[in-house]
Image: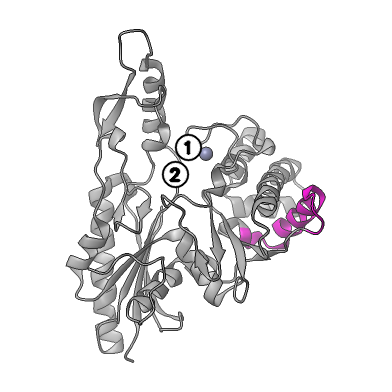
Amino acid sequence: MTGHLAAVDVGGTSVKAGLLTPDGDVLYERRWPTRAAGGPDAVVAVVLDAARDIVAAGRARLGGDPLALGVAALGRVAKVPSFARRAGRAASGACSRRAGRKPSYWTYSGFRPVRRECVHGVARQAELSQHALGPVDEERGVARRSAAAGRRDVPLLDLVRDAVPVPVALGQDLRAGALAEARLGAGCGLPGFVFVALGTGVGGAVVLDGVPLPGSAGRAAEIGHLRVRAAGDARCGCGSHGCLETAASATALTRGYAELTGRRLPAAEIAGAVRQGDSAAIRVWHRAVDAPAEALTDCAVLLDPAAFVLGGGLSLAGDLLLDPLRAALARGFPLGDPPPVRAAALGDRAALIGAGLPARDRTAPTVTPALAPAP
Ligand SMILES: [Zn+2]
């Protein structure tokens, strides 16, 4: 077959690579562990291996190089690992605004403690991200690192371009997933919708006329960090309290259930326990419904989307999540009937497919705004 595409989706736990038809059908797929604990160099090595591997697989299986390769990578503020949480607490304690002294804190460059000036008066834990690559800046083609955390941006687009002999496009994973849902999935034909991914973390994208909006600094639709009453005062990885992500992620479900029962179960098993009438599971599940209902109500009031499209691992619970969420949204929405809530159609392949679609556009006369600039 000629005219195929290649795509790589860099997730928090696995890197997926696939060969796609120009229409987005996945022909072949491989996965590797992300190796986030090894730091940015280790993750970049996995990404480059995956890029080379999938291009070679295209040659071997489909008889030629792909038209283009698309890469989608993390775009959201992530959870903070335990060593970083310790660093963050120490940092907060070290930070001082006493007269005559600049506020400062201890952070890590790699694993080496470094004293830094604190620009906000508190140590920002979000800068010490669980994921070795920072949020993707599609315009510049880099994975951003915080200057305050002592790390430099990773020039991911240039590195991948050097590794494979085909055109490369770089996108942010949630916007890639939303793009795939817009063109091929549950958002198909809608003038505008809000994509919400409830998974290990919580993120989203606002799609208008088929284009996921990046925002002025690539931070649009960070819905996981909307503050909601149902989350109480729980501390979030971004450094704030009461974010949606602390109540409605798979991580939050596992933690909440463990606090009530002492047992750590994956979210899918908690969903099963809800169906069997487990009272602790039902309690944490209610919170995981009420919290996004609040956030979606605010989004609906602000944006009036044609629909919400729910993706991520929790959305696989289906009506167990969607029915009470629709009911809670209907109760809380003050302006008549709320927008409908649909389940995403493309599952955990949405970002992989959405990475490939801009790569197709990259080779077509019309280029979408989600594309990185041409070399
Ligand atoms: Zn947050």
Crowd tier of the residue under label 2, counting other residues whose Cα lies within 10 Å: few below 14, some 14–19, many 20 or above? many
Q: Mark 1 points at which residue?
A: 237
Does residue 155 show up? Answer: yes
Residue at the top extreme?
A: 99
Given the image, on which type of amino acid does mark 1 rest?
Gly
**Residue 67 inside the magenta-drawn segment:** no
Task: Say whether disc 2 or disc 1 marks the residue closer to the N-terminus.
Answer: 2
Q: What stretch is highlighted in magenta?
A: 315-337
Q: In this view, does 355 lie above or below 146?
A: below
Closer-to-camera residue (310/152): 152
User: How far across and how far down the image is residue 282, in percent?
Assistant: 74, 45
User: Is disc 2 in contact with disc 1, using a CB cutoff of under 8 Å?
Assistant: yes
Seen at 46% across and 83% down, the residue is: 23
Question: Horizontally, is 8 left or right of 109 in the view?
Answer: right
How would you classify the magenta stretch by its main secondary structure?
Answer: helix
Q: Where is the C terminus found, in terms of image quarters?
A: bottom left
User: How far across and how far down the image is residue 168, in percent?
Assistant: 28, 70
Q: Is residue 255 above or below residue 113?
A: below
Q: Secondary structure under badge 1?
A: loop
The Cα atoms of the two marked residues, 2 and 1, are separated by: 6 Å
Closer-to-camera residue (347/221): 221
Q: Mark 2 points at which residue?
A: 78
Q: Where is the N terminus found, in terms of image quarters?
A: bottom left
Crowd tier of the residue under label 1, counting other residues whose Cα lies within 10 Å: few below 14, some 14–19, many 20 or above? many
Closer-to-camera residue (266/174): 174
